[in-house]
Image (cartoon, rainbow, N blue to C red):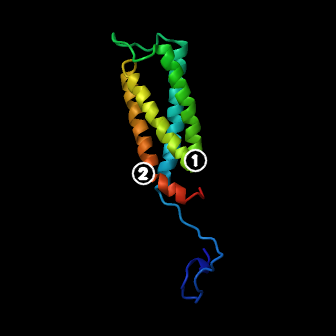
Amino acid sequence: MTQQAHPGTASGTGPISAGAPRTRSRTMWVGWIWFGGTMMIMLGMFNVIEGLVALFNDKYYVTSPSGLLVFDITGWGWVHLIIGVLAVAAGFALFTGAAWARVATVVLAGINALAQLTFLSAYPVWATIIIALDVLVIWAVIVHGKEVESDRTW
């Protein structure tokens, strides 16, 4: 770092001129947004795989006697596939730091958690793990998203 970056140093240099760009150091909290983006990509890929399995082998998932809510296994396969593709796209968009990407990520993670909740009778342990990861992504993006907005250098 140059001496100009430290106003009032012992060398007698004054404050930075008005035209000089200000640099801001990145804190560790920005890493939570990277985590959220990475997890959205992974969750999206999990959903794509879950959707493809439901589409190609509808006997893989065993449902309870009460069945699934709203759709059959094939219908939920399409739902998971579409949500998965959108989640992967949102995860990559989150790396840009754009506000719309953060909103899209929170909305898609919430929709994915609800979809997994309705799919709970078919695959309870996996759906519970995905819901927990969705909640963690929502937390990371909401709590630490503002810092990304002020630090677009990454």
Q: Is residue 59 above or below residue 151?
A: above
Between residue 118 and residue 131, name the one nearer to us. 118
- The residue located at (52%, 55%) in the rendering is 148
- The residue located at (59%, 37%) in the rendering is 89
- The residue located at (38%, 26%) in the rendering is 117
Separation of marks 1 and 2 at Cα, in angstroms: 16 Å
Residue 67 in which image quadrant: top left
Q: Quadrant of the C terminus?
A: bottom right
Instruction: Left or right? Give the position of 14 relative to 144.
Output: right
Residue 140 in picture, x, y percent from top left? 44, 47
Q: Amino acid at mark 1?
A: Phe
Q: Secondary structure at mark 1?
A: loop
Between residue 148 and residue 60, name the one nearer to us. 148
Residue 33 in picture, x, y percent from top left? 50, 49
Q: Residue furthest left?
A: 65
Residue 1 in picture, x, y percent from top left? 60, 73
- The residue located at (46%, 36%) in the rendering is 109
Q: Which residue is mark 2?
A: 143
Q: Residue furthest right?
A: 19
